[in-house]
Image (cartoon, rainbow, N blue to C red):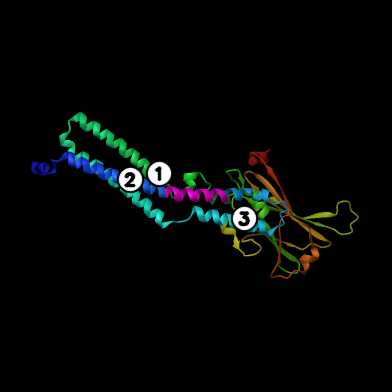
Amino acid sequence: MDKIIEKLVLFHQSDVLTIVFGVTAGLFTLVGFSTIFISMNSQHKIEKAREFLWEIGNIPYKYTKYNDDRIGKETYHLYSLYNSILNSKDKTMRNLITFVKGIFIFIAFSWISTCVFLMNEFHIAELIYVSLIIIVAICFLYLFYRFISKLCNITELAGLPKYEDLLDLSKENKGISVVSIAGISMILTIRKKSETHLKISVGFPVPFTGAGIGVCIYGNKDNSKEKDSSEFIVNDYEPRCWIEKDKYVWCLNNASYFELNLLEFEMPQEISEINFQIALNCIRGVINVHFDNIKIEVLKNMDIVSGHYFNPNRFNEIYVENRDQQREQ
């Protein structure tokens, strides 16, 4: 055992310390250059992601008329670009980060091993002092190690909302009203189930979640002498269904890529035109989406296969601080 300890004694301590210090300094220089390169790449992604985020937040204020197919197409385009930036997998960057993290581990190991080899040469006070310095230095290395690990995760690094959060209608991220974007980009789809029944569904350019959908349908009578010439066909603003990803049906029509089937109802008699209102119910409140009146003759003459697609005419928002408490009252 004594012979083993004698072999572990460093006889040229100053030379060893000089070499360890030189190698460590060189590795830190390499880490510095690598970190600058990684940071510049991450900063570029963060700037582009913020630009797309600002454009997404500007969608409800960009258009004065909502019966425009460009709203859905622009929403899909911006959401797709934002998601591609957040989830882009740059293999070179990941390999470089792994390489830098490996350097940190090597430096920490070299410091600890050097201290172990020299511990026989130190007095107790010197050993405690050197050990404390190395422990503090390794703690700083660990903090920087964690920082380097986050450089690929730009949502956490820059405080950007996740893609899934921008799909949740119950959340408001960085001042972006997701429920307003869902309302103006919604497309109403009416298909003919039979000669007497219609099938109603709504579509969105992206798979929004976190809200329920209510429907109000009423018809207007022609040449009626009654003061109130409209009658309700369906009057149900309470959620008929909850928006969930697994309920969507992929459909490539008029930028309505994700469709939800709502209901089927019998085509009313003695009605000249019909009107639809869709309510999005979420924690933050309710948004009522209104569509133009549709002539009943148009619905009767459409074929069963194609169906008709309608963009919103207008919408209004009702926000409450605690909607559940309001219901109980």
User: Circle 3: is it few (<14), some (14-19), or many (20+) Cα within 10 Å?
Assistant: many
Kind of residue sitting beneath label 3: Thr
Q: Please say whether residue 48 is one of the residues in the magenta stretch.
A: yes
Q: Is residue 314 shown above or below 294?
A: above
Percent x, y of residue 84: 51, 56
Outermost residue, top direction?
125
Determine contact: label 3, label 1, CB under 8 Å: no
Kind of residue sitting beneath label 2: Thr
Pointer 2: what residue? 29
Tell me the tag on residue 301: none
Pick whichever of labels 3 and 2 is earlier in the sequence. 2
Pointer 3: what residue? 75
Please tell me which residue lies in front, 100 or 203. 100
Q: Where are the magenta residues, as a range?
A: 38-52
In 3D space, how far apart are the residues under numbered discs 1 and 2 (Cα atoms)?
17 Å
User: Circle 1: is it few (<14), some (14-19), or many (20+) Cα within 10 Å?
Assistant: few
Query: Which picture quadrant has residue 273?
Result: bottom right
Residue visible at 51% across and 54% down in the picture: 85
Percent x, y of residue 256: 64, 61
Depth check, mark 1 against mark 2: the one in front is 2
